[in-house]
């Protein structure tokens, strides 16, 4: 089994993330969407809520699952039997950031290979940060996410 872990905060999960997962299922037998706990970020949406929303998106795709985890991504990959990390790249800035992380993950778990997929051009401008900002101020984000976000509560 070729298992890929797609780690991130997914706060929220975007159409760009959806595209990476769908394309990943063409390369791997199983894709685990892994929602990590980033100690330097305060979440916009609760992890449990995001898990449910993502699971609903993939309800008809048995090869995609969603799990939350704490600790190092490389350790979690080993725990779930994933030999691949799946990552999307929007631009060269993403590459510089992701390359450094890939090297560190490989140091922690030498069996772990990072696979980069270039974001589809129509989705390259989408980021969770921008979506949160638009949503926080009452803007419509329906074109950017594969589900309806709950109303923002100040």
Image (cartoon, grey):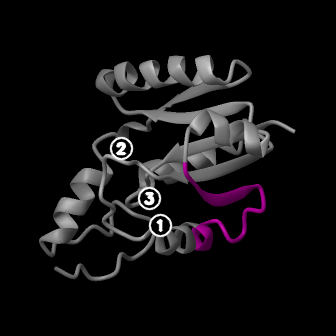
- On residue 47, the disc is 1
126 relative to 154, above or below: above
Contact, mark 2 vs mark 3 (Cβ under 8 Å): no
- On residue 122, the disc is 2
Which residue sits at x=31%, y=46%?
40
- On residue 93, the disc is none
Alpha carbon distance from label 2 to label 1: 27 Å
Which residue sits at x=37%, y=45%?
123
Secondary structure found at label 3: loop
Depth check, front residue: 49 or 95: 49
Determine if the magenta segment contains residue 68.
yes
Q: Position of residue 7 (x, y in %)?
A: 54, 44
Alpha carbon distance from label 3 to label 1: 11 Å
Depth check, front residue: 48 or 32: 48
**Magenta segment range?**
55-70
Residue wearing tag 3:
13
Which residue sits at x=73%, y=36%?
78
Determine if the magenta segment contains residue 151.
no
């Amino acid at each position: 089994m070729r298992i890929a872990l797609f780690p991130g905060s997914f706060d929220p999960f975007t159409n760009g993330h959806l595209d990476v997962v769908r394309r990943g299922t063409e390369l791997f037998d199983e894709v685990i969407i892994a929602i990590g706990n980033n100690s330097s970020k305060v979440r916009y949406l609760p992890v449990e809520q995001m898990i449910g929303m993502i699971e609903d998106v993939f309800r008809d795709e048995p090869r995609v699952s969603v799990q939350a985890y704490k600790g190092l991504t490389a350790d979690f990959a080993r725990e779930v039997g994933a030999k691949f990390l799946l990552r999307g790249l929007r631009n060269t800035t993403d590459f510089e950031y992701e390359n450094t992380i890939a090297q560190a993950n490989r140091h922690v778990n030498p069996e772990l290979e990072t696979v980069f997929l270039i974001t589809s051009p129509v989705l390259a401008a989408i980021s969770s940060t921008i979506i949160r900002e638009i949503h926080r101020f009452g803007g419509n984000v329906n074109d950017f996410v594969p589900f309806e976000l709950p109303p923002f509560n100040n």
